Image (tube, grey):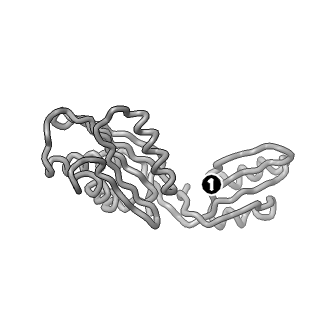
Amino acid sequence: MKSILKKEVYEVTIKHSKFIGVIIPIESLDDIKVNLNKLKEEYKNATHYCYAFKLIDDKGCSDDGEPNKTAGIPILNVLEGENLINVLVVVIRYFGGIKLGPGGLIRAYSSTCKEVINKALKIDLINGYEVSITFPYSNEKEINYLLKNSIIKNKEYKESCTYTIEVTKEVLDSISNFVTINYKHEKIIPKLD
């Protein structure tokens, strides 16, 4: 399984219409709505915000007013062809006055999606955990060393240190003697080397 590391943007003009492809890593259906709203704010007055998404156990797309099956499905087909999950691709169109026809729209949306995917840094995904851990300040240096190939999503400093992390089973086993585990749940996480 592969996903992407961070948001990327690609822009092209085809017959006076501007197409802006945006690829964003996501983890849930809620992330789709949040990111679409942000893009609609960032790219105001666009004619269409067509998109497709692929999660581990769900997928979907929208033509957003373009003729049926000329935008969302072509974007989704490219996503599936690249074997990417946990991603949202939005292709924003500012209409330039020249109609492209169904074939032209399919090519424009597909190629914009392909180009923004090509810009993105792809990462392998593996089974792991999202975990909240608490430990004394005196162990912070050692814990940070043990987490060097893990994702630290949040750090909180009160009476002790509390981290929210994404880790493999091996890393979790290596730190479990030094920390208190507040919660853990299984999750697909980026493989970091």
On the image, which quarter does residue 150 sit in? bottom right
x and y, in percent, of residue 38 in the image: 46, 39
Query: 162 left or right of 169?
Result: right
Tell how many labels. 1
Q: Amino acid at mark 1?
A: Ser
For residue 111, side relative to residue 165 (left or right): left
186 or 125, which lies in front?
186
* Residue 59 in the image: above or below residue 159: below
Q: Residue at x 65, y 65 (%)?
A: 185
Q: Which residue is mark 1?
A: 150
Which residue: 19% across, 33% down?
96
Among the 4 quarters of the image, the one containing residue 2? bottom left
Secondary structure state at the residue bearing disc 1: loop
Image quarter hosting the C terminus: bottom right
Q: Position of residue 11 (x, y in %)?
A: 30, 37
Which residue sits at x=37%, y=62%?
Answer: 83
Q: For this view, does 16 lie left or right of residue 40?
A: left
Residue at image point 77% right, 51% down = 142
